[in-house]
Image: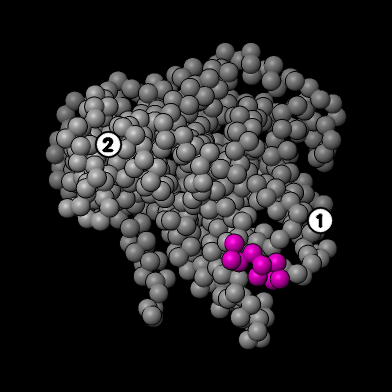
Amino acid sequence: MSTTTTPAPATTASLPGAGGARGAGKLRLHHPLTPYVMCAPYLILLCMFVLGPAVYGIWISLHDWDFMLPQKPFVGLQNYVDLTDPSSVIFQDFWHGMRATAIFTVASVPFLVLIPLGIAIMLNRRFKGRSFFRAVIFAPFVLGIAVIGVLFTYLLDAQFGLVNGFLGLFGIPPVGWAQTQPWAWVALVGMTVWWTLGFNTVIYLAGLQEIPQQNYEAASLDGAGGWGKFVHITIPGLRNVLVFTITTTVLASANMFGQSYLVTKGGPGDSTRTAIMVMTEEGLRNFKMGTASAMSYVLAVFLGLVSVIIFLALRERNPK
Amino acid sequence: MTTLQDPAVDVDAPKTEDRKHRKAYNQHRNGPIFWVGIVLLALVFVVPILWMYLTSVRPVDDARRIPISIIPERFTLRAYELIFADAENPVLQWALNSLLAATAHAFLVIVVAALAAYPLARMEFRGRNLIFSVIIATLLVPSFIFLMPNYLLMSRLGWLDTLLALIVPGAAGAFSVFFLRQFFLAMPKELEESALIDGANTWHILTRIVLPISKPALVTLGTLTFLGNWNDFIWPVFVLFSPERLTLPAGLATLQGSYNIDYPVVMAGATIASIPVMILYIFVQRYVIEGVATSGLKG
């Protein structure tokens, strides 16, 4: 740290006219190495645990990398070919997992984008205790998937669960939430919406505050009703926020792991075994890291494509 | 302290020029339907969490009664006595591990991110834009990419089954640097300039001026980081194996396995995992919500 604490007399001396050559009003009074020294700890961690591993993962995916064996023969693109070859051992597991991930994503994203929008509009009104309600709705998200997972295992228990107990009040017979389809998907989507809805709600609330009130008043004068204001003022005003929530929600849903792992255990059958579950079992339980790494890159490419499509679909069509 | 404003978005406070318009706009009263709706909504979020706490102090047969009884037949600490005495599921040890890992991780993140974010926001140097572009690019890479290579790295470093595996690798996250940089960018330059004229060096400016006025941002980042680490599930489940080394989330999964449908015991474990974060949340709830709102708007 000595470089950062040592004042640089040469530059300090030139204080009155400092920065003149480097552009208006820019002071440059630190030692030339100071910024590098300050960034160094972060950059070392970034190279070791982010940039290095991202490249190392590709290297692993090009090998038959059995963690338990001393030999890790280079196999080129074979792991990727196996993922596209219907006769390989891994093909079915992988695409089954990808399908489960796709089902969960398609089923959960509309609810996770629309319900928080409705709640945010409701919470955007002025009323007593608004901050309290906002905090309550965000609270489950603070709990983390392990707590949520074991809690919902109990809430969704076919015999003793609160959910079936509540439905029973209306004469609805018990549902085997974790044991039968399509109820397992309904349960996983429902618990995910309950758990994470506060996150998007808060982002929408912040976005709603950025829309000038004058726009609503002008729309009122033009005779717009509640729906008209929503379609012509609120939605366009939230365009960037919507791109953000849709993209992050798709990525989060595609990462689904804990809900299936804890509540349905991938079942009934293999129906809720998601891509991340297949990948972690292959790589971190069976220690076949080569195929598991290849899977992670294929899934990442899929998600990259989906993000680009969302971005293109929601971009501003008529730039002014 | 200073006139510096917290750039985190305060979703409660409309912009000043909007305030009088808003007042006029919100003249209409919220009717009873609105209040019934909002209270029902709040109940949907509160009841399951209360049910978890309530179940943890029920007798086991009371938690498995049909029809469900809302009020426990009697209160008992049986579930807590059971897990605290259970040598195979050392819940207190898990809590200690979680606390150690999350605290150390949050501390490391704040120190490393503040050191890097300050020059990235306030200094001119060759390579600054390159470094910042790399940081932004890593925000876009999904985290599961790092599972296999970082697992192998942990095994090379001998960090498997140790808390180091939870504390260090995630500390290079891009969000923390990005978040603090945004905050530092909003500070008035005069603060540093006058300190420089008074003869302060970079280190003094950072520790005596910049960091003290950044307290709201540091608290927000620290809380978000602590919560993220405390709740992390997938990574600890795979890099920790020994029963005494687990964190609470990883431990809960094994607890669920060993107690199956003794729900009061599993709910007691979940209660122990949730109480510290709930208390933290109640105290810094404003910071957590603002931090999330800010990250969404700037993203």
* Residue A108 inside the magenta-drawn segment: no
Decide: is A14 above or below A6.
Answer: below
Residue A13 x, y percent position in the rendering: 20, 37
Q: B26 left or right of A311?
A: right
Q: Examine the rendering and report whether any part of residue B252 can be seen.
A: yes
- Residue type marked 1: Phe
Q: Examine the rendering and report whether any part of residue A270 can be seen.
A: no
Q: B216 left or right of A230?
A: left
Decide: is A223 above or below B254.
Answer: below
Q: Quadrant of the C terminus of chain B?
A: bottom left
- The single residue placed furthest to the bottom in the displayed view is A222
Chain letter of mark 1 equals: A
Residue at horizontal 24 percent and vertical 24 percent from the top: A2
Q: Report helix, strand or loop for mark 2.
A: helix
For residue A223, what is the image quadrant? bottom right
Residue linked to disc 1 = A170
Residue at horizontal 22 percent and vertical 55 percent from the top: A23
Mark 2 neighbour class, 10 Å CA radius: few under 14, some 14 to 19, many 20 or more: many
Query: What's the magenta region?
Result: B16-25
For residue A278, what is the image quadrant? top left
Q: Front-most of A200 and A167?
A: A200
Q: B65 left or right of B271?
A: right
Q: A41 left or right of B31?
A: left
Q: Are marks 1 and 2 on the same chain?
A: yes
Residue linked to disc 2 = A39
Residue B197 x, y percent position in the rendering: 32, 38
Decide: is B74 above or below A36.
Answer: above
Residue A297 x, y percent position in the rendering: 28, 49
Nearest to viewer (mark 1 / mark 2): 2
Residue at horizontal 48 percent and vertical 28 percent from the top: B102
- The single residue placed furthest to the front in the displayed view is A16
- Residue type marked 2: Cys
